[in-house]
Image: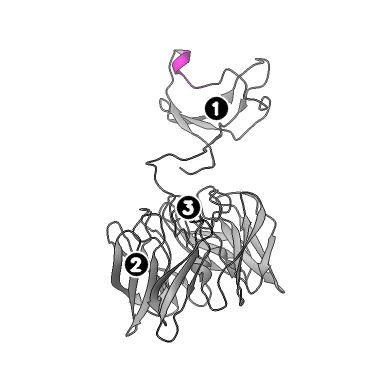
Amino acid sequence: MTTGNYWIDWGTTVNATPATAHFCPTTTIVDTRYTPLMNGRQFNVTTNTWVDVLETGAPATAVDLPQDFPFKLDGTRTGMRPLPYSRKVDITGDNRTDYTVTRNTGNTKTWFTAPNPTGTPASGVQFGNATDTNVPEDYDGDGRTDIAVWRAGALAYFYILQSSTNTVRIEQFGQTGDDPTIIGDYDGDGKTDPAVYRQGTSGGSSFFYYRASAAVNNNNITGIPFGIAGDKPYPGDFDGDRRYDASVIRNNGGNAQIFQQRTTQGFFVTNYGLFSDRFVTADYDGDSRNDLVVIRDNGGVLTWYVSTSVTNQFVALNYGTTATDTPAPGDYDGDSRTDFGVYRGGFFFTFGTLSAPRAIPFGQTGDTPAAAYLVH
């Protein structure tokens, strides 16, 4: 589990001995007496029913009210499952992808978010120019996605609205022509690093550049020579060591040939998909490694092809239409596996491993889903 606030449900057994019966606190939680909280539930395994957790503390004459028991995780614990790579565009920090879109009005970009699964849509946050590239990620390591954009120029800049402090962080990094959608955690410290991919010229090598946020390499810029002119970057952690790998797609007679320099497993090459496909940074099997995923236009229908890294299973699914839909993958049901998703003129359509297909009305025609940066 990552740092955050959580709510607990648990099972109890009815027993004649009060000490082993339903849990009821005998003292008042500070500042909660007389206050209905989140209506916590406990499961009675004898009657197979859910019942309220009641606060029955002093004074006894007070009304008994339902409550939950929040707790906060601070620090780290070794041996725990790493942060899932399915967790993208999680603005609220509850381990689910939120319904987030950007809207351009004149030269202004506004971000709108509807919390998932429930919640009141937040008022729009004006952040960035209309021509900026959306690059939302968790740059400060607080478990919530930060609103962020990259602005091209002779000196390009990342503008990051850090959720931990609600302050704007400005990083000069890159130049016009670079691709900033390769952002990720390249140094393995749990924070996204500013990064760009720069195409090679005159037969020279292409480069992955990133600025490390880890304390031992703070602010140091690292350049990884990998790929050649004409290649496309395909970012992700494909060997599961919590560090993004240098990865490119090369046109091989119309087919896609993937070259990777994995930080732990070393050099890797495979053929997968067509060069004209769109490649998705996603983890569909929940093993904390990015899978090989492409989206192909098949006669106006979007076909998703997934090759999982755990079992090497191959999945093909038609989901979305080319003319109207923008792919928006994410973990919408919170099971640590990426779900299929598209955005169509004011609706999110999602299909998850734990949930039936859903249509969520949000936004309007012309909006861009924030998760679109995951498709290359």
> For residue 357: magenta?
no
What percent of the width, then of the height, locates residue 269? 29, 71
Where is residue 251, by image quadrant? bottom left
Disc 2 residue type? Answer: Gln
Between the C-alphas of marks 2 and 1, the distance is: 53 Å
What percent of the width, then of the height, locates residue 12? 44, 25
Tell me if residue 331 comes above or below residue 7 in the rendering.
below
Q: What stretch is highlighted in magenta?
A: 18-23
> Considering only order in the chain, which callout, 3 or 2, is on the residue closer to the N terminus?
3
Can you tell which mark lies on residue 53? 1
Q: Which residue is drawn at 32% across and 61% down?
A: 308
Q: Residue at x 64, y 16 (%)?
A: 58
Between the C-alphas of marks 2 and 3, the distance is: 22 Å
Q: In the picture, which quadrant includes the N terminus?
A: top left
Can you tell which mark lies on residue 261? 2
Where is residue 102, by image quadrant? bottom right
What percent of the width, then of the height, locates residue 362? 61, 61
Relative to the observer, which residue lies in front, 264 or 128? Answer: 264
Can you tell which mark lies on residue 216? 3
* The furthest residue to the right: 106
Helix or strand or loop: what does disc 2 sit on?
strand
